Image (cartoon, grey):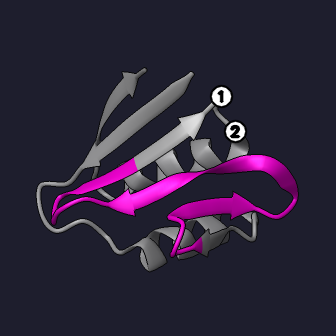
Amino acid sequence: MVTTREIHFAGTCPSITEIVGRVRRQTGIPASYVADKWLLTNPFNQVDLFSLYQEGKHKIVLISDGPTTDLLGATLTTLLAMGGSFADYTD
């Protein structure tokens, strides 16, 4: 099951670099972003990866296949703490 999560920001959303850096600091997971594939990965767990990209000035999109992983949960929590609001769509 593919789940798309949209995080909306009233102002300009944070950069992917800011998001990844904050997730690393808060969790200790050395998350790695593969920009040309829009993937955020956890090197400690090969199934802990999902698509992450900015769409427009006010939205970050996360697309995952399967259950919520540690990295995905931490990223969602971080985005909300950075001022985002959440919408979830399941295909």
**Percent position of residue 67, x then y:** 67, 27
Whether the residues at callouts 1 and 2 have beta carbons within 8 Å, the answer is yes
Check the image and report above or below for 16 versus 86: below
Residue displayed at 57% across by 21% down: 1
Residue situated in front as seen by the camera: 75 or 56: 56
Task: Give the answer, above or below, for where 90 lies relative to 72.
Answer: above
Secondary structure of the residue carrying tag 2 is loop
Where 44 falls versus 86 (above or below)? Answer: below
Tell me the CA gap for discs 1 and 2. Answer: 9 Å
Q: Horizontal placement of 65 versus 76: left or right?
A: right
Residue that badge 1 annotates = 66
x and y percentages locating residue 45 in the rendered image: 85, 52
Label at residue 11:
none
Q: Is residue 37 left or right of residue 91?
A: right
Badge 1 marks a residue whose secondary structure is loop
Instruction: Return the x and y of residue 79 as percentages of the image width and height.
Output: 40, 54
**Where 69 sits versus 84, above or below?**
above
Q: Is residue 66 magenta?
A: no
Seen as rendered, the residue at the extreme right is 44
User: What amino acid is labelled 1 in the image?
Assistant: Gly
Q: Could you tell me the amino acid type at mark 2?
A: Thr
In the figure, residue 26 lies in which quadrant? bottom right
Q: Position of residue 33 (x, y in %)?
A: 59, 72
Give the magenta part as a residue range.
34-61
Would residue 17 appear left or right of 23 to someone viewing this image?
left
Residue beneath disc 2: 69
Q: Residue furthest left?
A: 10
In this image, 85 relative to 36: left or right? left
Q: In the rendered view of the protein, which quadrant contains the C terminus?
A: top left
